[in-house]
Amino acid sequence: MSGFSRRLFLQASGLALLGLGVRRLAALARPRPWADVPWKVQQVLKQLFGDRPVLDGHVQLDVPTVAADGRVVPVMIESDLPMGADRYVKAVHLLVDNNPDIHLAEFRLTPQIGQAFVSTRIKMRMTSPIRAVIETSDGALWGAAADVRVTVNGCG
């Protein structure tokens, strides 16, 4: 009789599936980007939004992974949230963790704009996470974060 039976195969398959399930649970339990925010950024978020939590989703942050020049870093922020008269994106906040002024920009929007979209260029002091926070008219906060590596210093 061969060394690999049907029973051994089924047992190995079951263990493999169990391993995949454990790995998936670990991925689901992984902390979100807004749970691991540095203290100084937490202070700025608290000043801006009080104790309201920033939730993941509804924000697309488009930045380069490597910025060749920190003096001119393109940033695009877009939200899929509706821009209706009763509920809309009223503000877009841009934060850069390692800049001298963490709260780099705030853009105020009205429902008449039709779509929550901001495109700008920023100055970055050094390699840092960039965070976009969308604030809705009903007080909800949604965010996204991305790391940008700066190769030439921008802010001195």
Image (tube, rainbow, N blue to C red):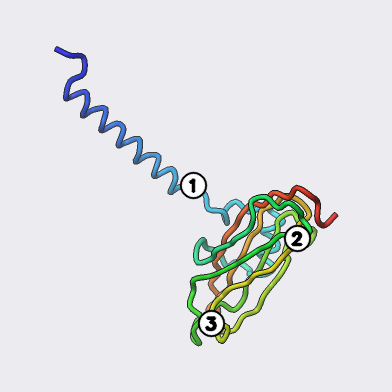
Residue type at the position of mark 3: Gly
N-term-proximal mark, 1 vs 2: 1
Residue type at the position of mark 2: Val
Name the mark nearer the viewer: 1 or 3: 3
Percent x, y of residue 91: 62, 75
Residue at x 74%, y 61% (from the top left corner): 102
Name the mark nearer the viewer: 3 or 2: 2
Using a 10 Å C-alpha cutoff, classify the residue at mark 1 as few (fewer than 14 neighbours), some (14 to 19) or many (20 or more): few
Name, please, the residue furthest toward the front: 68
Q: Distance between the Cα atoms at labels 1 and 2? A: 33 Å
Q: Disc number at residue 72?
A: 2
The residue to which callout 3 is attached is: 114
**Which image quadrant is residue 26 in?**
top left
Of residues 91 and 60, the one nearer the viewer is: 60
Q: Disc number at residue 30?
A: 1
Using a 10 Å C-alpha cutoff, classify the residue at mark 2 as few (fewer than 14 neighbours), some (14 to 19) or many (20 or more): some
Name, please, the residue furthest toward the top: 1
User: Contact (CB < 8 A) between labels 1 and 2?
Assistant: no
Percent x, y of residue 20: 35, 38
Percent x, y of residue 120: 69, 68
N-term-proximal mark, 1 vs 3: 1
Residue type at the position of mark 1: Arg
Q: Relative to residue 74, is residue 153 drawn left or right?
A: right
Say what secondary structure mark 2 lies in: loop
Residue at x 63%, y 72% (from the top left corner): 118
Using a 10 Å C-alpha cutoff, classify the residue at mark 3 as few (fewer than 14 neighbours), some (14 to 19) or many (20 or more): few
Percent x, y of residue 152: 79, 50
Residue at x 70%, y 56% (from the top left corner): 97
N-term-proximal mark, 3 vs 2: 2
